[in-house]
Amino acid sequence: MSLRKVIVTGANGFIGSKLCEELTSQGIEVIAIIRNEEENITAIKDLPGLKIVYCDLSDFRNLADYVEDRDVDAFYHLAWVGSAGPLRGDDVVQVNNVRYTCDTVRACSDMSCKRFIFASSIMEYEISALMETMDSPGINTLYSSAKIAADYMARTIAASLDVEYMRTVISNIYGPGETSPRLVNTSIRKLLRKEHCAFSPGEQMYDFIYIDDAVKAFVAIGEKGKNNGTYYVGSLSPKPLKEFLIELRDAVDPTAEIGLGDIPFGGVSLGYDEFDIYAIKNDTGFVPSVSFTEGIKNTAAWIKEADNL
């Protein structure tokens, strides 16, 4: 289907704002759902063809009362409280996220929108693998568990309401505009400041995708994704983490020494055969175009300017 008008929740976040930018650049109208008027909307407020609607997640069940449009082609649900930081381990917050996701699917149906795209995470597979072991899960894995519950329940509710449901499995998205202390950001900042970077041995399989490619993947899924499809959003070429880290180092400061093996690895390794990484290419034709080295150089240049380094 050709997208003409879409709704995006979490529209002022890192991924959401870039998705809005990509959608509007293609002439697609966007209804951006923002929690309240105190939120920062600098990145999206001047985008052509974008309308901002304020609605807190706790009132998403009544979202149809806030949105006048009824000719919406796709509904992207990215909003999630506590996707990073200490709230990942807050069970009340994470259970509420599950409820809000279910509410959002029902609101999607209320607005006669027939296609719902849920932003999921590779961490769902990590927690599933961990639960098969005798290890005790850390409190922050409540976030991953909530994502699983939200996915299962949202897909079930969507089916009952005749709403097409697509799930995106996000690997590791990075790029200009991302401010969290995730691996890429932290490592680039340390390298730019000539600080030592300590890592695990990096033998586990890993993957990254540049933000510009990631949002193009979301658009492709909204247009051509299949009902109940699960779409991995990554580079299509996972490899051992240490290879990415060496490539990152070489792109930022080839003279730096990085501490591979300084930190023991205590997580769960995925083989990346847990999901079909090529489903997005097969169903939509999407293929990433930005190499990891190019993406890291772009991100490093942005961090250098933003942090005055």
Image (cartoon, rainbow, N blue to C red):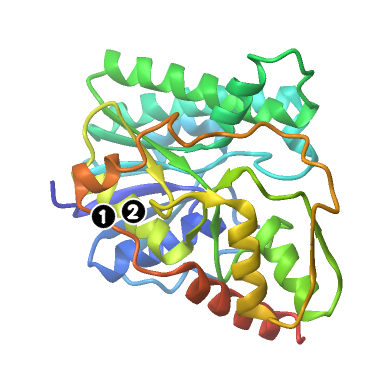
First in residue order: circle 2 vs circle 1: 2
Q: Position of residue 176 (x, y in %)?
A: 56, 71
Q: Amino acid at mark 2?
A: Ala
Q: Amino acid at mark 1?
A: Phe
At x 20%, y 48%, the residue is: 284
Q: Is residue 70 visible?
A: yes
Q: Is residue 36 above or below residue 149?
A: below
Most foreground residue, 32 or 216: 216
Q: Is residue 166 above or below residue 95?
A: below
At x 50%, y 56%, the residue is: 15
Residue holding disc 1: 286
Mark 1 element type: loop
Left or right of 100 in this view: 302: right
Q: Position of residue 193 (x, y in %)?
A: 82, 79
Residue holding disc 2: 217
Q: Label 1 neighbourhood size at 10 Å, few (<14), some (14-19), many (20+)?
A: many
At x 37%, y 21%, the residue is: 155
